[in-house]
Image (spheres, coloured by chain):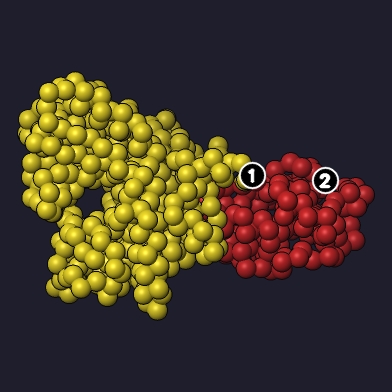
Chain colours: A red, B yellow
Amino acid sequence: MASPADLKYTRTHEWVRRDGDTVTIGITDHAQGELGDITYVELPEVGTEVAATQPMGIIESVKAATDLYAPVNGEVVAVNDKAVETPELLNSEPFGDAWLVKVRLQNPDQVAELMPATEYDAFAEHGA
Amino acid sequence: MSESTETALRQTPLVERHRRLGARLVPFAGWLMPVQYASILEEHRAVRAAAGLFDLTHMGEVEVTGSGALSFLQEVASNDISRLEPGAAIYALLTNPQGGVIDDIIVYRYPDRDAYLIVVNAANRDKDVDWLQTRRALQPERDVTVEDISDRTGMVAIQGPQAVAIAARLTDADLSAIAPFHWARAIVAGVPALVARTGYTGEDGFEFFTPIERIADVWDALLGEGQSEGLVPVGLGARDTLRLEARMPLYGNELSDTIGPLEAGLGWAVALDKGDFIGRAAIAAMKEQGAPRRLVGFKLVGRSGSPRHGYPVMAEGRPVGEVTSGAFSPTLGENIGLALIERGAAGVGKPLDIIVRGKAAPAVQVKLPFYRREHPAGAGNQSA
């Protein structure tokens, strides 16, 4: 499945959608496929300051636990309680209902530095 | 995974079939094995609700023959092998002189030959064979042969409430007449097989042993025959969650060189009254004093990440042990685990804290097993 062209991507398999001075963040379809059945999601609290490439949450599947990384610097302004309550949503709707956090950007230029969809898909296919 | 890593691993004759079924293949005990096909949760639930098919060709098989076979097995294995009638099987441990565990095994007595088959964990195969050969060599005059037949033996299992019915349609033999922990010869899908009513899931079912070049025929036939009843191929991921719910030990987690059978709650597999065997004195001494640690089951109380092997366990603010196995239980929809903890902290209903990534997750000790099927095997499946 090709990743949506209107989003930006990280090497740690998060997607980022910019909306003015905030971004919405989730994990990619490739990431959910690698993890398998997702059973638990732990997200930062609203108000938390996060820093690009630093862990800000945890995604667990039946197999293993992995970190969720912040793609950008900024302040968490919203978290998706629905994804926390029904983690399996990350398997079925990774780019949609299962968004994870919204962050107010400290430096909007950071978004431009992330990968476009075609580059991410090639990266994800050829090995992380 | 790189190509070179893949080629260094052993492959079962079914590996191309696993690929075509969409399996994710991973290294396991030196083998390239399917960890999951579609979803661990779905595979797990299929085994509880209908049936699952497992490639177990990586497991080790060791044949013990000769007039001294029984006395040799009585020396190396913890359980009383003399209780085995022809065609019967028994769970036992290979114990070391310190009372620790080298491996957990099933010993099958052949139905029609004066010989035994030991099925061992893939990860322990070489270690076990070395150990058995070493013990054998201590008394070269006795008539015992220990032979590793793993390379020429194929093994698959079908497990689940529909397993017996599905397998029965592939043979003229009356498989339902094979009692739990027994085996018999049968022609299955045209293949001469030994069919054992044993497994590692907590469900009824069979494990099939065939010449390795014929195992694919049995796999294909079972998969084709069972699909209409919901049978699916099952990988190692669900095999682990299934055995955990049924409280079956995994060597390296619940058992090791330094975890004894009594600590692991496997006293029932140790026949202290059968005569001497390797490790008997140490195990008897521990029984006298009481095992210092106990294997207990627990459930996490609130929402949390899953407990995993090696996570610390606290009680009343101090460390009391470690998680040996833990997972999100697909059947119960809760986080469950086994932990090896100080005797004083053990007790159903007593609280524990599991340290999940540095944070204490409250847990309560529960009765084991976490899951028990409604109808025991071999009870006609109606009357039980």
Q: Which mark is residue A73?
A: 2
Distance from disc 1 to disc 2, alpha carbons, whole Å, reads: 35 Å
Q: Nearest the camera: A79 or B331?
A: B331
Instruction: Look at 36% across and 44% down and name the residue there.
Output: B151
Place residue A98 in its image quadrant: bottom right
Place residue B137 in its image quadrant: top left
Does residue B90 appear to the left or right of A7 in the view shown? Answer: left
Does residue B238 appear to the left or right of B257 in the view shown? Answer: right
User: In this picture, is B333 found above or below B80?
Assistant: below
Does residue A68 appear to the left or right of B136 in the view shown? Answer: right
SS type, badge 2: loop
Q: Which mark is residue A29?
A: none
SS type, badge 1: loop
Q: Look at label 2 and name its amino acid.
A: Asn
- Badge 1 vs badge 2, beta-carbon distance below 8 Å: no
Place residue B288 in its image quadrant: top left
Instruction: Look at 28% across and 72% down and name the residue there.
Output: B170
Q: Identify the subunit bearing mark 2.
A: A
The residue to which callout 1 is attached is B2
Image location of residue A126, percent across then percent down: 73, 51
Image location of residue B28, percent across then percent down: 47, 44
